[in-house]
Image (cartoon, rainbow, N blue to C red):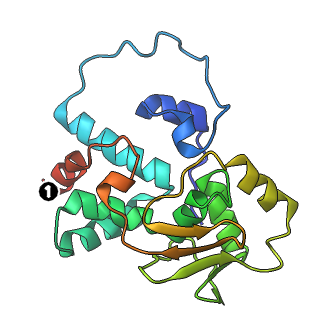
Amino acid sequence: MARNIQPIAKRCKALGISPAELGYAKKTTKRNPKGQVRRKQSEYGRQLNEKQKVKFVYGVLERQFKGYYEMAERRQGKTGENLLSILESRLDNVVYRLGFAMTRPEARQLVSHGHITVNGRKVNIPSFLVKPGMVITLKDSSKNLEKIKANVEGSSYRATPKWLEYDANNMVAKVVAAPAREDIDLPVEEHLIVELYSK
């Protein structure tokens, strides 16, 4: 399986986002301190940067991202907002949002290793798209894992999105609605991605 193995702090600096957006609170880089002084970016450069930012944050590669864009285009409403809603509905992202994992790559690993169930059935596909009415929880045997307990405690400061209903005592969440644009805190101009693919 293809993976992006570029250093997190370096990639965040290049894309102009904080590592905290990805759950990495302690990562920083001191390389090239004057690197912020850059030439004016072209319109194409801005569009490409926004696309790369969203791909990097959600851990999606180009082919899959284009598939999500085409899916968003077929839905009613604004294509850019539909795209972010689809990405936010990925199971690995939901696991991250619930605080079972500190980062999305860690959430992807939890899903891949079979720790997560959807509607009572084990799902080990990180890209699985959740829909309203679905119930997401940890397997009973996984709820007692020290790593997961530490993650839940360590991410307690993170607010659960409005589109998820979460019972912290039982570690059970229900999807109550599709993610809306105001529920997604990612600092991105999604209309630039639509412009890029519309060329």
Where's residue 17, x and y in %?
45, 34
Query: Observer-nearest residue: 85 or 65?
Result: 85
Amino acid type at image mark 1: Ser
Residue at 51% from the left image edge and 55% from the top image edge: 59
As drawn, is 15 to the left or to the right of 49?
right
As drawn, is 133 to the left or to the right of 188?
right
Where's residue 21, x and y in %?
51, 41
Q: How many marks?
A: 1
Residue at 73% from the left image edge and 75% from the top image edge: 115
Query: Observer-nearest residue: 64 or 108?
Result: 108
Where's residue 93, x and y in %?
53, 62
Query: Pointer 1: what residue?
Result: 198
In the rendered image, which quarter is residue 28 located in?
top right
Q: Is residue 109 visible?
A: yes
Where's residue 45, x and y in %?
26, 35
In the rendered image, which quarter is residue 173 located in?
bottom right
Vertical relation: 127 (above or below) 18: below
Vertical relation: 62 (above or below) 21: below
Vertical relation: 47 (above or below) 104: above
Residue at 52% from the left image edge and 69% from the top image edge: 165
Q: Is residue 63 visible?
A: no
Q: Secondary structure at mark 1?
A: helix
Query: Observer-nearest residue: 111 or 39?
Result: 111
Vertical relation: 82 (above or below) 193: below
